[in-house]
Image: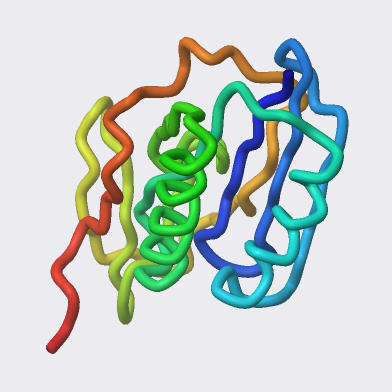
């Protein structure tokens, strides 16, 4: 059995396949999550059986978070595979994440806040080379951080 980890908070969409915690396959796609997730998982489900589905639940792109959650939650229910999550800072060395305008999400200890930043150092999201399931939580609801603008 394998674990699938998805980071779809912007471009590229990253999908990692892990066997006993070690990364065995990495997929990067410059497409939008709404276009590429079904295509990626169509191929992966022919090759692997999954014991866990994991995703970065935000903050980040509202649409990326929504699409990824709905896609993986549906897959989790239909395949009877647990869906786990953690915040996006786990995948970018806790660097600021763009929100809107000059506002960025920053993580201070366990609190995620919005702060105005000028020229922050941004680290791209990366798939870890190894994972420990204990680092992920069954509290998998998306984290948007700010309300949608109406």
User: Which image quadrant: the C terminus?
Assistant: bottom left
Residue name at image x 27 percent, y 44 percent: 141
User: Which image quadrant: the N terminus?
Assistant: top right
Near-viewer residue (35 or 108): 35
Q: Is residue 147 left or right of residue 141?
A: left
Residue name at image x 44 percent, y 66 percent: 67
| Relative vertical location of residue 55 with respect to residue 51 in this rendering, above or below | below
Q: Is residue 44 left or right of residue 58?
A: right
Count of number-bearing discs: 0
Q: Position of residue 123 (x, y in %)?
A: 60, 51
Residue occupying the far bottom of the picture = 150
Residue name at image x 40 percent, y 60 percent: 65
Q: Position of residue 142 (x, y in %)?
A: 30, 50
Q: Is residue 148 left or right of residue 86?
A: left
Q: Position of residue 85 (x, y in %)?
A: 42, 34
Colouring chosen for the image of the structure: rainbow
| Relative vertical location of residue 85 with respect to residue 126 in this rendering, above or below | above
| Relative vertical location of residue 132 with respect to residue 51 in this rendering, above or below | above
Near-viewer residue (85 or 120): 85
Residue name at image x 82 percent, y 43 percent: 26
Q: Position of residue 48 (x, y in %)?
A: 79, 33
């Amino acid at each position: 059995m394998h674990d699938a980890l998805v980071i779809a908070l912007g471009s590229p969409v990253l999908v990692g396949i892990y066997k006993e915690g070690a990364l065995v396959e990495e997929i990067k796609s410059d497409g939008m999550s709404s276009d590429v997730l079904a295509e990626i998982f169509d191929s992966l489900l022919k090759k692997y059986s999954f014991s866990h589905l994991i995703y970065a639940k935000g903050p980040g792109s509202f649409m990326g978070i929504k699409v990824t959650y709905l896609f993986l939650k549906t897959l989790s229910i239909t395949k009877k595979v647990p869906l786990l999550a953690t915040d996006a800072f786990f995948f970018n060395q806790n660097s600021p994440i763009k929100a809107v305008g000059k506002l960025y999400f920053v993580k201070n200890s366990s609190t995620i806040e919005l702060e105005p930043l000028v020229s922050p150092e941004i680290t791209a999201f990366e798939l870890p080379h190894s994972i420990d399931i204990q680092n992920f939580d069954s509290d998998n609801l998306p984290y948007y951080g700010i309300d949608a603008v109406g």
